[in-house]
Image (tube, coloured by chain):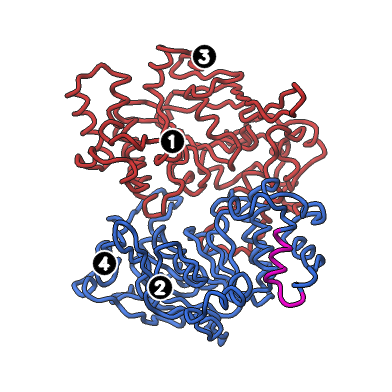
Amino acid sequence: MAPNPKETLLDVTNLTVHFHTDRGVVQALDGADLRVKKGEVVGLIGESGCGKTTMARSVLRVLPPGGRLVSGSILFKGQDLLALGEGELNRAIRGKRITLVPQDPFNSFNPVFSIGTQIRDLLKWKGGEESKTRVDEERIWEMLNQVQIPSPGSQLKKYPHQFSGGQRQRLMIAMALLPHPDLVIADEPTTALDVTVEAQILRLMKSLVRGREISVLFITHDLGVASEVCERIGVMYAGQDMETGPAESLFSDPRHPYTSELLASLPNPEGTIRDIPGDVPSLIRPPGGCRFHPRCPQAKGNCSREKPERIEVSPDHWVRCFYPRTKSA
Amino acid sequence: MGMPILEIKGLKRYFHGSSDLFSKKVRWVRALDGVSLDVCKGETFGLVGESGCGKSTLGKTILGIYRPTEGSVVFKGNEISHLQGHEAKKIRKNIQYVYQDPGASLDPYWKVGKILSEPLVIHTSLSKEEIRKNVRKMLDDVGLREEHLSLYPHEFSGGQQRRLGLARILCLNPSLVILDEPTSGLDVSVQATILKLFIEIKARFDLTYIFISHNLSVVRMMCNRVAVMYAGKIVEMGDTREIFGNPMHPYTKVLLAAIPEIGKKVEQQREMPLSGEPPNPENFPTGCRFWPRCGFKLALCESVEPPLESAADGRKVACHLHKNPPVLITSSKCSSIDL
């Protein structure tokens, strides 16, 4: 994919987040960068505990108790989100300009209100000026049709438990799109679903954001899903962003040793299995320098001492490594 | 492949379903509805399908955790499904089950040493010293260290908990091991390590695996033969390479097409994903259970249930179409699946 002049929507630079726990300070993000352009689907992949969700939660400033944004900046449409007060953030950003499709469609609805009530409430608060006085039923119906919930009239009276997992995730997507956001953060939206339902939901999400100029930050641990849905992908490991690039070149030609090791550990039909030696480090006492160096086959002396800067190895393909793999022929 | 170590015939398991408040009529959940299969000695037999299709119920019915409503389970030539008490205990030493969520299946109040020696205390008459020796050896076999014995299960990572689950069953020296979703919830790099361990252990201890999983790429890599289940029945069964290379049943086709793969793009896929969701097990459709979602449905499918029959290459398929697939399948190309 050629580098395009699309404007940057979300620009996270040098973000450091710590969690204060009983066992010590968990250094969940260590100067991580993330950029999402307008109308782009960006994937954030990595193993559990690598900081994908922390990154998403920091953007919305909804970190769990004990979470501290230590340093860095989050610019959304040029506006510094870290400088905004809670009230302003609630009024203008959360659930309005930036919405969230959560991982677990089972626990994300309020079980004691009907789906209709919950959607109308959402529009009342986040749907824009005209919605404050009158909820636009047509807008809801149209959206439910688009996420393929049949006969919206009767469905709106139902309660969350009356829907299957796939339908609930469709409703979640509808609710995330109704306020006409600029950015949708989808946090493992299909992890809880079966593979055939997952395929339906992915296709649906892709078709809905296309043409609407909506950007998506798609968080997943499934490399296959990321490859199918995303245009650009960021790979994270232990709180550091390791590699960012166009989906095709990142998977066909990974330049960071971690990305290539991760791809090699995927199950393949030939039946050869390769794993990455060692374990994911504790983030309370993380290794210095590049956090991947204890497991890295290419690590040299300086990797343990200093953290590498991001370098652009090919157009729009960035790697945070002193010794990136050379481009394969 | 060698001799069948396990032969299952017409196995059914029904559960009490929901009932109306004032009616005595009970609806039955037909979780397992007539499953027949053979597992040969030394093979890895895969069971795949979406949640609720009956994979785990089948595993648990084989072991005897659930008593079959109907049908037989023959293990090494002996009918085992109706054994009780002492007899059942003897068999269970030979068939072991590795649970889906090791974090929840290990007692949180027990130290690892006690957890690992429990099966030996129950099933053998070894002395304390011998048990300790055995446990230490098993720990070493699954790649854990002796100092782990004094820890509690929650102090282990997901991958290490799987190792514990494996160590616990290995000390009984079983011949058939049922692995229920052994890698769900693991990251890919940990998954690779654990799969490697499974392969290694299988060769060293001369085991036969029944591998239950919804992760199709893992099944393709691990299993010699595979059975695809849908709504309590087997729809297709045979050699893994043949089934993955050329799926015959329409359900297997969409299931395989739905695997997210690197390099594939959602918008470029020809095959449409499956519409709808699996049927309610209290109220299956008549005829073939897959017809409401099937893109190649014939009029016949709505009324007559297709039997599981042998196809040309030795696999078994339960579909009315399998006798003449080329004509039908190329002509309709999922056109009736709407999304």
Q: Chain of mark 4?
A: A
Q: Which residues are magenta?
A: A118-130
What amino acid type should be assigned to the residue bearing mark 1?
Tyr
The residue carrying pointer 3 sits among few (fewer than 14), some (14 to 19) or many (20 or more) residues within 10 Å by Cα, namely few
The residue carrying pointer 4 sits among few (fewer than 14), some (14 to 19) or many (20 or more) residues within 10 Å by Cα, namely many
- C-alpha distance separating marks 4 and 1: 34 Å
Same subunit: marks 3 and 4: no
Q: Nearer the viewer, residue A256 or B124?
A: B124
Residue lying farthest left?
B129
- C-alpha distance separating marks 3 and 4: 56 Å
What amino acid type should be assigned to the residue bearing mark 4?
His
In screen coordinates, is B124 left or right of B43?
left
Figure chain in red: B
Are dots 4 and 2 in contact, CB under 8 Å? no
Q: Residue at x 33, y 54 (%)?
A: A275
x, y percentage for residue B199? 35, 40
In this rendering, is residue B272 above or below A327? above
- C-alpha distance separating marks 4 and 2: 25 Å
Q: Which residue is mark 4?
A: A293
What amino acid type should be assigned to the residue bearing mark 2?
Leu
